Amino acid sequence: MEKKNIDWANLGFGYRTTDYRYVSYFKDGKWDDGALITDPNITMNECAGVLQYSQSCFEGLKAYTTEQGHIVIFRPDLNAERMESSAKRLEIPVFPKDRFVKAVEETVKANDAWVPPYGTGATLYIRPYMFGWSPVIGVKPADEYQFRILVTPVGPYFKGGAKPITIRVSDYDRAAPRGTGNVKAGLNYAMSLYAIVDAHQKGFDENIYLDPATRTYIEETGGANVIFITKDGTLVTPKSDSILPSITRRSIVYVAEHYLGMKVEERPVALSEVKDFAECGLCGTAAVISPVGKINDHGKEICFPAGMEKMGPYTQKLYDTLTGIQMGRIEAPEGWIHVIE
Ligand code: PLP
Ligand code: COI
């Protein structure tokens, strides 16, 4: 296979049409066999459930080229499980886990020319998504659905890659208590758009959201969970029922405990204690681990001692170990890496 002629090292986080996408249709109470297709466009009824009532959810994972030259994907079974909980919460029929993993593998394999080569800093972003596409006008679930997977090569989510970013405490909430914050519903992102445009206009890279019930505790950003490092090297990460259970964060917790021998605390983290942490980072499939240099809380700056030039030492170690596992430089825990070819 010949790779596409792309300047891999300078890719941003954007969409590019690739050769194949996967689609399976749910009709008459069951999913069909599914297929890879070439048409990137979707035609649907004007009254489709997704268009009227935002009945949709999605996932995000990546394919990597390892040091040994294999194409691999990272923990796709956890994305399948999370999509199952998203689908159930949104009254979308579940796409079976084994079929999810197989479909991701097939889609990546078909698009192998788009998987960025090892060492370029780019990866293939994989976006499975589901939506109601039969017409509904009364508020109810659609009868028919599509499960799809698109892939697109990407670079760093935040411009500047590993350079620390500045985020601000948002006045808006991304989730409601007992709402949909813990699933990957498209609607969670729609409601964050106003806040992110406003943050960018004011010179901030992202919003950090507080718990919607009391606005006392740190939740997460619009597209990533948060990790903190204490001055004595403990990893602290917020626990809340309204944040997305990040697969990257769960992997980092494992890496911290089992590879780096760090102490880990998963607990509610009050905004008032953030000033005492030494390092802060955002973690997610797109964000990987993006260091945070500063949090702006309504004009009051919380500056982490690690500074604005480079990642703090613990964040760097976590980053190196996690990406080392993903890129085949460090042995992975059992079941984390699926080799495609
Ligand atoms: N939180 C939000 C709101 C996200 O959109 C994402 C991205 O998927 C994450 C956290 C990180 O989750 P993961 O590590 O599974 O990609
Ligand atoms: C991901 O990391 O996969 C996400 O879905 C986050 C989004 C902001 C791109």
Image (cartoon, rainbow, N blue to C red):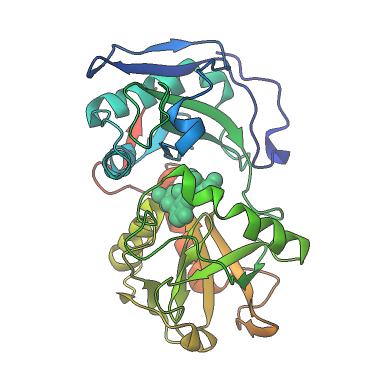
Number of numbered discs on residues? 0
Q: Residue at x 63, y 48 (%)?
A: 156
Q: Residue at x 64, y 56 (%)?
A: 194
Quadrant for the N terminus, please.
Answer: top right
322 relative position to 111: left or right = left
Q: Is residue 63 something that shows in the picture?
A: no
Q: Quadrant of residue 181?
A: bottom left
Quadrant for the C terminus, please.
Answer: top left
The image shows residue 168, relative to residue 49, as above or below, that is below
Q: Quadrant of residue 78?
A: top left
Tell me residue 91's x, y (percent).
29, 37
Residue closer to the observer: 240 or 228: 240
Q: Quadrant of residue 213?
A: bottom left
321 relative position to 189: left or right = left
Residue closer to the observer: 153 or 168: 168
Q: Residue at x 33, y 33 (%)?
A: 141
Q: Is residue 269 something that shows in the picture?
A: yes
The image shows residue 9, relative to residue 161, as above or below, that is above
Tell me residue 151's x, y (percent).
52, 28
Residue closer to the observer: 320 or 218: 218
Tell me residue 226's x, y (percent).
47, 66
The image shows residue 279, relative to residue 251, as above or below, that is below
51 relative position to 292: left or right = left
Tell me residue 129's x, y (percent).
43, 32
Q: Residue at x 66, y 81 (%)?
A: 298
The image shows residue 9, relative to residue 258, as above or below, that is above
